[in-house]
Amino acid sequence: MLALAGLAVLLAGYDSAILVLGLPGIAAEFQAPVPQLSELGSVLALGALGALPLAALADVAGRRRVLAVAVLGFSLIDAGSALAPSLAWLAAARLVGVCFETATAGVATALVVEEMPGGRRALAVSTLTLAAGLGIGLTTLAYPLVAPHWRWLYWVGAAGVLAPPVIWLALPDPAVWARAPHASRSLLRAMAEPPFRGRLTLLVAVTALAAIFYEPAGLFVVLFGSRSLHMSSGQLSAVVVAAGLVGAVCFGAGGWLGDRYGRRGVGVALSALTPVAAGLTFATGATALYWGGNIAWSALASAAAPVTGAWFAELFPTRARATSEAVVAVSTAAGAIAGLQLVALIEPHIGLGPAVALASVAALGGAGLLLWLPETRGLPLPE
């Protein structure tokens, strides 16, 4: 189960990294300035809206089927992305691709949390985080070999169409999901009843604030290094590889800490430290700080991901767990659009790096709101 869910997340991670790493080449080919690239990022963030009905379907019809369809969807979209004759075409293709990638991450997380024993859920989610990191790592290693030919990476991604039949036939639905009621009215009722309504409202605020910073930071980190620091594609990939290697070590460490010491304390601490480190990446034009900020950002974010991933999934009932993941993804999209538009607005006045660094204040505020969520380590999953 972990291998198949991890395969789906790995392919989605590979897919999502292509645009970020290939952004300098995409910008050069289509002669796109930063405001236009911010519009591209805003369009892509809307893809989370399409993940919402897919997640609801996963709660009603099962995790396995929807996960297989989502992987098939973004793999086919890769072929359309590789053929893009314009930035508008690429934006439209990636909009649909993000829909399927977001659904893949949410459904896979729900599946793993439901299948694992209470004392190992965060550690199990860390395997998904590691798989996503490996997918990003494949893109990172491949791009310098083909740069600036970003289209080739999408053609390779289209080979993901081989995975959905295996997922459909071999991946079981969790027994926890099989016992839960699956009518759409049960799903809607679960989202509206206390305490889940308050938890969801709080998470919407937290993730929106975080995305105000992390979306522009993730989208522009390579472009900032290329344009502001004049680093080559090889040097930029070296930074991403170094950060990824450090992050890979921290995935399991974060999962272990979350299972041993609890979600709340560990999750809040890591979520507060991450925007500080990430903000330093963009704060100055110093190459050394760019290296150090990227590595620290990767380490802290990698450790935080399995803790918060397990925590957020454990907060909601099985009959609406995948849907809650998608609702949070939609709020992330709203924050992402706000963050990208903010950067586009102030970048001409203060520069790209300071504009992105300024947005880190929002993510820090969101981390503070996590203190209002309850501890869930070791508790039975609500059905």
Image (tube, grey):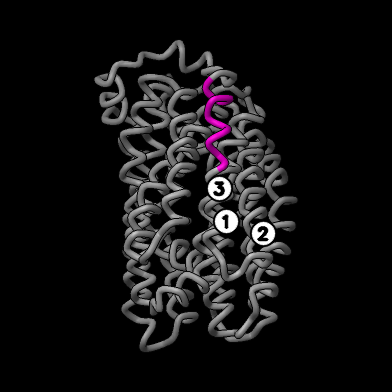
Alpha-carbon neighbours of circle 1 within 10 Å: few (<14), some, or many (≥20)? Answer: many
Q: In the displayed structure, would residue 179 be above or below residue 142?
A: above
- Is residue 126 part of the magenta span, yes or no? no
Please tell me the numbered disc located at residue 153. 1
**Range of magenta residues:** 159-168
**Residue at x 64% of width, y 29% of height:** 2
Q: Toward the viewer: 93 or 176?
A: 93
- What residue sits 36% from the left and 89% below the top? 349
The label number, if any, that marks residue 142 in the structure image = 2
Helix, strand or loop status at disc 1: helix
Where is mark 3, residue-wise?
157
- Depicted 248 relative to depicted 319: above or below: below
Give SS at disc 3: helix
Q: Specify the amino acid type for callout 1.
A: Leu
Q: Position of residue 310 (x, y in %)?
A: 55, 36
The three-letter amino acid code for the residue at tag 2 is: Ala
Residue 312 visible in the displayed image: no
Residue positioned 64% across, 73% down in the render: 233
Image disc number at residue 342: none
Residue type for callout 3: Gly
